[in-house]
Amino acid sequence: MTARILLASTLLAATPALADVNVYSHRQPELVEPLFNAFTAQTGIAVNVAFVDKGLVERLVAEGSRSPADLVMTVDIARLNQVVEAGVTQAVEDAALLATIPPAFRDPNNQWFGLTTRARIVYASKERVADGEVTTYEDLTDPKWQGRICTRSFTSDYNVALTAAYLAHHGEEATRAWLEGVKANLAKKPEGNDRSQVKSIWAGECDISLGNTYYMGQMMADPEQIEWANSVRITFPTFEGDGTHMNISGVAMTKAAPNKAEALKLLEFLVSPEAQEIYAETNHEFPVREGVKRSDLVASWGEFAPDSLGLVDVAALRPAALKLIEEVNFDG
Ligand code: FE
């Protein structure tokens, strides 16, 4: 059996009498289909997926209690938080989820749950950056990095989350100074995505860039980008006295959830060892469940200490972080 893929507009009409689970996914089809196929094989419950690229929150709000969606899957704490703040989710009290997902990666009110984690790390030129030269996020303001840093826009979700974590650790004045210091060290204006920064390192335009870990896996699977990937190594900076900034992909149950019992089964499946291993292999993310094997590529990056900050605190400081980023005109 395969997960049925339907356009969102046909989802309602196509839902048969047998209880399927309906998912609105912001995640790419190729990432979630293997998971849903395994779930269907194991339980006989079909999963209908609507891939919603833009306007996920607006759609759920418009549909209200008549929404066919049971679950919402997306990446980044900011987007999960947006869904919750729109009032279209419900709390899920489930012993298996609580026992499996570390507290830092789930909502204390059980409105959202992390399924995988990713680290926001530094890609460093193998040729021009020595082993051990990248140390902390704080150190990115050191004059030794002048003209050597590339990054995507700092108003992008991943960098806002990193800045919110900085704010949680160090407070407003230090964070403003950090943003100004990193900006002063940029090789060029922020543009493009995480992978295009690695391309810039490969092209000699800069020596280090901020990026998420799984993009290494994506670049290595692409015939053009593998060269970029091979020009860098992954280094795990930490916050001084703490660990490496983490973000998540995650899931929330909608308030409407017409097929709640089946949706709960899918939620529990997503944190099972089987599903967590599929996740780890397909997108080179870190399983949220402890003891699940990382992909060979991910394991090759070595061990690191994740930051201890809970993502709920990162979410709370997001507006303040964005304000600081705009005040220093980081991208300007
Ligand atoms: Fe991404």
Image (tube, rainbow, N blue to C red):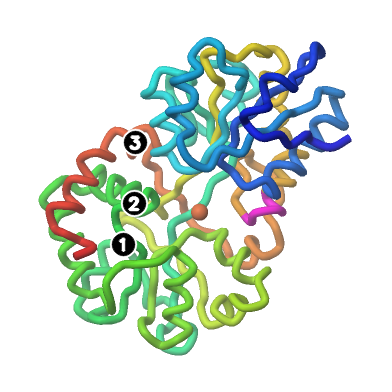
Query: Which mark is drawn over residue 315?
Result: 3
Q: Earlier in the sequence, mark 1 or mark 2?
A: 1
| Amino acid at pointer 2 | Leu
- In space, the residues marked 3 and 2 are separated at their CA atoms by 10 Å
Would you name the residue on which mark 2 appears? 162
Residue extent of the magenta highlight: 280-284
Residue at the location (79% across, 35% down)?
Answer: 3
Indicate which disc residue 137 carries: 1
Compared to residue 215, the image places residue 199 above or below, namely below
Q: Does the residue labelled 1 lie within 8 Å of ligand 1?
A: no
Q: In this view, does 4 lie to the left or right of 42?
A: left
- Which of 159 and 60 lies nearest the eye of the viewer? 60
Task: Please give the name of the residue rendered at 45% of the width and 26% of the height, measured from the top-left corner.
Answer: 107
Label 3 Cα crowd, 10 Å radius (few <14 / some 14-19 / many 20+): many
* Residue 249 shows in the view: no
Taking the image as shown, residue 200 lies to the left or right of residue 230, namely left
Q: Which one is in front in this view, the residue at disc 1 or the one at disc 3? A: 3
Query: In the displayed structure, would residue 314 be above or below residue 199?
Result: above
1 and 2 marks in contact (CB < 8 Å): yes
